Image (cartoon, rainbow, N blue to C red):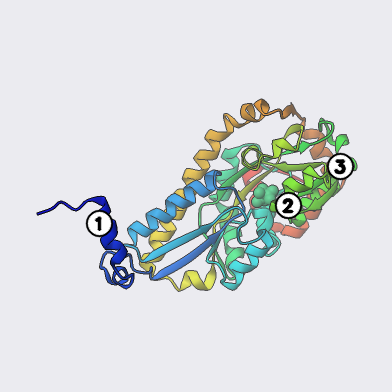
């Protein structure tokens, strides 16, 4: 018997009509549930790494019945586009920041109240507890499903292309980009800055062309989006803790059988908790990495910013806008704010 050589195998394959491959039993069959997930972050961010792991786990545990195709880095459009796509069922999943989903579910911005959280212990006590449950109920009323565990974006810091931000006085007239978020606009106007709402996909070029002179984001975002290339200074302000809600189109979610919902829910929640750990680990090294890339850092005194926000009535305004119940849950987790 002659042993087939690579050449002879390729020759025989070339002669084989394509149709036979489709009939061959080992060709993977189409998934029963073909789901799409869009997000606004580069592939290298821990959110995409953990989401990919979750998709692989779900495919395996569902014996191929569920396939989740991931569209990272604004491939499907900006946050506003993906929010409308998940609402109309064009995509199944999306991970909007709380700031962004708040354009549809206002109370979702409650975790972004300026300087509310002192540390991650307070963040997770609130978001894995009553504050998070309250927000998830509000998201459900918008016919969306929010998974239990929020994913971490991080404590937001302020960067500038000009002089560093040392105190609240340095905010006067500062052209700063913020996400498409009413609370962000309100907060930076209360600090006397000149905030401009832009989709994340537009931030790098807006900084590069000096349409804006500043932006604010957690350090891991500044790193993966290479914003250090177009910014000079970073003020450690921790002015907002921001997280991503992993959400699903409500009708699509309810249309999944219970066993599939369990597989998907467990995998996504577990991935979210692991992603929090990734951000925590990253936070231990990211500042040194950004400094090595030329970004200069300075500390700030949060009290100067808090005092300015109080004086401008920011806390009182948002206490009224969120309502007594939500505000009470937040203060129950972090103490008196207004
Ligand atoms: O747009 C931003 O600044 C980002 C990436 O942090 C959010 O998704 C809110």
Q: Residues within 10 Å of mark 3 (few under 14, many from 20)?
A: many
Q: Residues within 10 Å of mark 2 (few under 14, many from 20)?
A: few
State which tag comes first along the sequence, 1 or 3.
1
Q: Which residue is mark 2?
A: 202
SS assignment at label 1:
helix
Could you say which is closer to the camera, residue 113 or residue 332? 113
User: What's the distance in space between the residues labelled 2 and 3, CA to CA?
Assistant: 18 Å
Tag nearer the camera, 1 or 2: 1
Residue at the extreme right of the image, as rendered: 173
Label 3 CB sits under 8 Å from any ligand 1 atom: no
Q: Looking at the image, is 64 positioned above or below residue 158?
A: below
State left or right for residue 60 relative to residue 264.
Answer: left
Instruction: Please report the residue visible at 55 percent of the width from the left and 67 percent of the height from the top.
Output: 91
Q: Which residue is mark 3?
A: 174
Tag nearer the camera, 2 or 3: 2
Residue 194, numbered circle: none
Q: Looking at the image, is 203 positioned above or below residue 121?
A: below
User: What's the distance in space between the residues labelled 1 and 3, CA to CA?
Assistant: 67 Å
Residue at the extreme left of the image, as rendered: 1
SS assignment at label 2:
helix
Q: Are marks 1 and 3 in contact (CB under 8 Å)?
A: no
Q: Quadrant of residue 103?
A: bottom right
Residue 9, numbered circle: 1
Q: Residues within 10 Å of mark 1 (few under 14, many from 20)?
A: few
């Amino acid at each position: 018997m002659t042993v087939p050589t690579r050449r002879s195998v390729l020759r025989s394959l070339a002669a084989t009509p394509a149709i036979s491959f489709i009939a061959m039993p080992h060709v993977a069959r189409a998934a029963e549930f073909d789901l799409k997930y869009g997000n606004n972050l580069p592939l290298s961010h821990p959110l995409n790494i953990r989401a990919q792991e979750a998709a692989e786990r779900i495919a395996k545990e569902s014996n191929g019945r569920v396939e989740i195709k991931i569209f990272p880095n604004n491939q499907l459009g900006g946050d506003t586009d993906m929010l409308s796509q998940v609402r109309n069922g064009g995509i199944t999943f999306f991970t909007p920041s709380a700031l962004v989903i708040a354009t549809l579910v206002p109370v979702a911005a409650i975790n972004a109240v300026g300087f509310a959280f002192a540390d991650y212990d307070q963040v997770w006590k609130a978001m894995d507890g009553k504050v998070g449950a309250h927000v998830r109920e509000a998201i459900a009323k918008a016919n969306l499903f929010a998974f239990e565990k929020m994913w971490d974006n991080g404590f937001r810091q302020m960067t500038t292309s000009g002089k560093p931000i040392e105190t609240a006085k340095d905010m006067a007239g500062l052209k700063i980009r913020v996400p498409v978020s009413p609370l962000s606009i309100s907060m930076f106007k209360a600090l006397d800055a000149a905030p401009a709402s832009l989709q994340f996909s537009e931030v790098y070029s807006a900084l590069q062309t000096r349409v804006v002179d500043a932006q604010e984001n957690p350090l891991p975002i500044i790193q993966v989006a290479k914003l250090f290339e177009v910014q000079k200074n970073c003020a450690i302000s921790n002015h907002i803790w921001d997280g991503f809600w992993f959400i699903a189109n409500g009708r699509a979610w309810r249309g999944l059988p219970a066993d599939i919902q369990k597989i998907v829910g467990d995998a996504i929640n577990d991935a979210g908790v692991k992603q929090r750990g990734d951000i925590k680990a990253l936070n231990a090294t990211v500042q040194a990495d950004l400094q090595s890339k030329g970004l200069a850092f300075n500390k700030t005194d949060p009290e100067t910013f808090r005092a300015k926000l109080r004086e401008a009535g920011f806390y009182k305004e948002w206490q009224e806008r969120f309502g007594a119940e939500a505000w009470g849950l937040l203060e129950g987790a972090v103490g008196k704010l207004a």
